[in-house]
Each structure stands twice: as C-alpha cells, then as structure tokens.
Image (cartoon, rainbow, N blue to C red):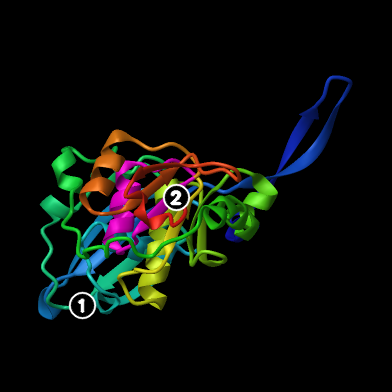
Amino acid sequence: MAESGMTSIPVIRCGTQSSEGSDDLVTVEAPLQIVLRYGPTEQRKVTQLAMTMRTPGNDALLAIGYLYTENIIHQREDILQTRHLSDHEILVELRDGIGIDLDLQMRNSYVNSSCGICGKSNLEEIKSIVPFLLGKGKPAFSKVDIMHWPTLLTGSQTIFQYTGGIHAAALTSGRKVIAIQEDIGRHNAVDKLIGYALRHYTLPLTDVAMLVSARASFEMVQKALMAGIPIIAAMGATTTLAIELAQENDMTLISFLKENRFNIYSHPERVSDI
C-alpha cells in the first residue's frame, strides 16, 4: 500500500487494562530527489536540484509545483516531460531557451518537507517576484461559508481518514473543494496543489481560496501568491512575516480556522458580512 501513501505496520496497542498486538496504517515518508534537465538542445545539462521528504504519490505535481513556486518555470509549456528515474528520483526536463541561474534559484540540496525556508541562506532569496496583482475585494465569501471550510477540507482527504498523520492543501470555490492534495510535508502539499493547478487550470486563480491544514507561514503565503490566489485560510496559526507579505500583496490571510470562529489578519474586505 506504499503507493497509496500509507502502509500497514505491526504495533502494540496499550490501554489502562490490557495490551494487544495489532496493525496500524501509517503515512509513508520517503525521499524524493528532483533532477533537472535543461539548457540548449546541443548542450543539455543535468542537475540534482533538490531533495525532499515526501509522501509518495503525485510526485510529478510536487516537482512541477516546486519549480513554479521557486520561480524556475513560469508556465506549463516550460516542461517537456517528467519521468521517474527510480522510486525516489524524478526527472523534469525543461524546454530549450529557459535561462536558469542555479546559484540564485536553487535551495540547498536538502529541502525539509515541513519547513520550506530552512534550506535558504538568506531571507531575501525567497522573496520571488510575485507575477500577479490581486484584485481588491474579490472574491468575497461569507462567514458561514468560511466556517464550513474545515469540514470541507477534512471530508475531502483520503489518507488522513486512515492515518491521521498527513497535511492537506485544497482549493475551494466557497461551497465545495475543487482540488486537493495530501503530503506528510505541508509545503509539499501546497506544491502538489499548485502543480495540479498549473496542469489543469489557467493562472492566476483569482476566484478561489486555498485551505491548508497546517499553519500559514511566510512561504505558504508566497506560494499562494505565485499562483495568484487571493485568500489563504489556515487551520493553524500564522507568523509575522506571513502577515506582512499578505498585507503588502493585497491577500486575505485567515488563521485559526474552526467551525465556529477564525481570525482575519489582512484585507478583511473579502469576508462579506463582518
């Protein structure tokens, strides 16, 4: 079942009165090396771009989303192909003509799946140029709709229902989830989601909100901005840098999202009835 993102592990279940052997479904965590092939047709180069610890499944979406949010590619047409070299290595081949300065663009060789900016040597390196300007006040959602989003998110997850140990990122049009991705790493889940959007939709994603099961960090906000998403709602906390980035770019940032309350940290005009 590893291909499904989970596997069965023997455990001992302990209670106050007894203990017994059983099996438990556990979320798979495994390394993925992203390999980049690029350059002029007659002088192609191959570089091991980054390694992340991820949940297997939708690896191509993860790689595509990562390259896009890192400002290495700018459209789906920049990619010629993606293919696995092994279970833990994926090749992304770019079209001829894409200029890449790996000294500026590439993270350190290891990308922690739960901490997106840990591998960066300088905070300024991750302030990529945001490609879209967000429309002021649009879209707008009601408090009732927003308070229903945690139910939408958890109800749309698959692996979480069995393991309880995986993050999710989803796009919602207000009353329904239109796309969702899961991964052991919260940043990986967002990269998979944006990779999916880059394949199937036209950016910017001006009419949707992004829901995340974790906290809304600086880089989570940055990734959403790269896709032109005007609202990010996190079930966890947020940070000062995330709030600052959202304020500067006209994004609505919601955190501590529950079924009966939430906090708005920037641009509340997109919540229609406060």
Residue 88: percent from left, percent from top:
44, 56
Look at the image and give the residue range highlighted in magenta: 214-234
Q: At label 2, which amino acid type do we have?
A: Ala
Residue 200 drawn at (x, y percent): 41, 77
In the rendered image, residue 219, in percent from the top left (x then y), is placed at 30, 46
Position of 151 with respect to 240 (left or right) is right
- In the visual, does 65 lie left or right of 145? left
Which residue is more in the foreground, 250 or 197? Answer: 250
Q: Residue 153: percent from the left, percent from the top?
A: 57, 55
Relative placement, left or right, of 44 versus 61 is left
In the rendered image, is residue 119 in sight? no
Q: Which residue is mark 2?
A: 233
Q: Is residue 267 magenta?
A: no
User: 126 or 21: which is nearer to us?
Assistant: 126
Q: Is residue 224 magenta?
A: yes
Q: Amino acid at mark 1?
A: Arg
Going 16% across and 72% down the picture, which residue do you hit? 44
Q: Which residue is mark 1?
A: 95
